[in-house]
Image (cartoon, grey):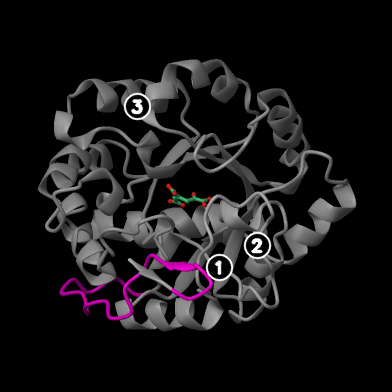
Amino acid sequence: MSTDAQGRVRSWTLEPSKPRFTLPPGAVDAHCHVFGPMAQFPFSPKAKYLPQDAGPEALFGLRDRLGFARNVIVQASCHGTDNRATLHAIALSNGMARGVAVVDPAITDAELDTLHAGGIRGVRFNFLKRLVDDAPKDRFLEVARRIERLGWHVVVYFEADILDEMLPFLAAIPVPIVIDHMGRPDVRQGPAGADMAAFRRLLDSRDDIWTKVTCADRLDPAGPPYADFVRAVRPLVADYPDRVLWGTDWPHPNMESVLPDDGALVDTIAQIAPTPALQRKLLVDNPMRLYWAD
Ligand SMILES: O=C(O)/C=C(\CC(=O)C(=O)O)C(=O)O
């Protein structure tokens, strides 16, 4: 971890390795964030972490180094419901980035339209208590109903221990759903462990629930080559090849003790999606369908 004089934390390495795995042309990093720059886009007073700047220039530099063509920028909790930093990054991308916003449930239809024009294609509902103060399911459902006309989806972030209590809420969402990081299963349980089995039941409950097979660094503390993550996730990619997405999670919010190596994370892709056909779906076809359908 690196903390500057203002107490702002850097959770990403400045020297990611060059991956050995060559990404297919047009690959999308479908889960990443930007932080600030703070002088232009201050963090929320309710932010639970205070990161150093990780703006569009650094994100696009990483994109090019790793071999991605496009980014899906997910509004991070440190910016609350002020999506200006995300929109700013999208605006600088020459059409090569789209985004997922976090919105105040009182947002107007006109404001939603403005987000759409700025490249937003979904709304994120975050249920992690360490990141947000409240997650009002009834109001989130109202938002989900109101974004249907825009062709958006919702991204839901929760951990495995609350999956059961999330089920009625998820079943009531009228638009496609993307679950961040597979609902954070304990990958050490293996592919048939209780967490993965419960998550598969959720995927089987609707054919419009997608998931990001991401965050080996968060889910597998043993580190590269992330053997437990690979063992647990590879069968999921094989069984749900049209509903999976992959992303770096750069700049890795709150990963402070071990800074993940983005090159090593990219190298897990060939392990969880071992054929060119699976890699193309995971990295190109699926994210393009969800984020660049128009
Ligand atoms: O984005 C992630 O993958 C993970 C986060 C941060 C986050 O979601 C946010 O700040 O909104 C986490 O687990 O701390």
- The residue wearing badge 3 is 199
Percent position of residue 77, x then y = 58, 51
The residue range painted magenta reads 4-25
User: What residue is drawn where x is 63% and y is 66%?
Assistant: 86
Percent position of residue 34, x then y = 54, 68
Taking 10 as reference, is 291 above or below it?
Answer: above
User: Considering only order in the chain, which callout, 2 or 3, is on the residue closer to the N terminus?
Assistant: 2
Label 1: element kind = loop
Query: Residue 249 or 266: which is nearer the viewer?
Result: 249
- The residue wearing badge 1 is 35
Q: Give the amino acid at mark 3.
A: Phe
- In what quadrant of the picture does the C terminus appear? bottom right
Q: Residues within 10 Å of mark 3 (few under 14, many from 20)?
A: many
Which dot, 2 or 1, sits closer to the camera? 2
Can residue 24 be found in the magenta stretch?
yes
Q: Are marks 2 and 1 in contact (CB under 8 Å)?
A: yes
Instruction: Tell me the CA gap for discs 2 and 1.
Output: 8 Å
- In what quadrant of the picture does the N terminus appear? bottom left
